[in-house]
Amino acid sequence: MGGPCRIVEPGKPHTQAPPCTDNFQVKQFMFDGREWESVEQCYQAMKFTKVEVQEKLRAIKKKPKDKDSKHGMDVWNEGQRYTCLRPDWDAVKVEMMYRANFAKFKQHSDLQEELLSLGNVELVGAPSTSWKTKSGMVNWSVWNGRIQTRIREELRPASEQRKDMLAALVKEFEDYLTTEGGATLPIPEVDGAAVGTAAAAASTAAAASTAVPASEVATTATTATADTAPAS
């Protein structure tokens, strides 16, 4: 579900990380040439092949008296109403979440400072949902923590990066994408994101391929599964 990541320190209870680590945080940023209210909104919209469906999600704005979590659940609920999923969604979902998060941080220096202020503490995501992959069950709590950890390293000056850790994280993201079948449609690029070789190659190949026919939009809500539950 939504919520900031958790800070893990030996011998201590987990404590809450800053709001910048929450995918439900409302902080406008540009991705795929359009402005989004939150990472969750962007992620939910990117699941779909039809631009009109993406735009319905993008049109959902946070009401003045609502909390960020309310807006996050609003976009998640809207994201369950359609069936025109990317055919490669299970493969690209982690990469898409990473790129949306990176875009948010890259465009807000205050969020960069907030994340970097955590130093080298271990981060795990808030309790969240699991989904089945070709290699077994995985949980967004694990991946959300890895996404924040990866971005934290990438935001540091090169001289301060833990290069072995960053290389291992990038490889883990690449391995997931490859194992799940790779991208068959383009993944929006983000300036400055350290896109791995496999992700770059998959996006290039997908862009050169023929278009996939759009799926039909569901007229009634579908039953939520682990694949479509709130990713944050």
Image (cartoon, rainbow, N blue to C red):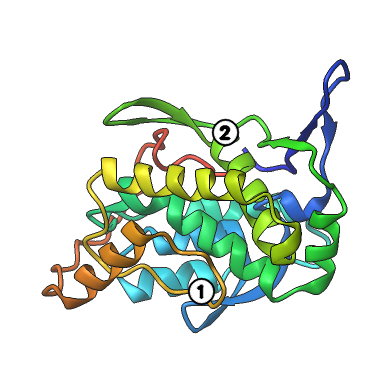
Q: Secondary structure at mark 2?
A: helix
Q: Residue furthest top?
A: 11
Res. 123 visible in picture: yes
| Residue 52 picture location, percent across and down | 36, 75
Question: In the image, 172: left or right of 28?
Answer: left
In the picture, the quarter occupied by the C terminus is top right
Q: Which residue is mark 2?
A: 142
At a point 32% along the width and 57% down the height, the residue shown is 198
Q: Position of residue 212 (x, y in %)?
A: 15, 68
What residue is at 26 percent from the left and 31 percent from the top? 134
How far across and down, in percent of the image, does residue 123 sit? 72, 37
Name the element at disc 1: loop
Q: Residue at x 80, y 38 (%)?
A: 121
Q: Which residue is mark 1?
A: 190
Where is residue 187 drawn, in percent x and y? Answer: 36, 67
Q: Which residue, as the protein is rendered here, is positioned at the far front?
A: 159
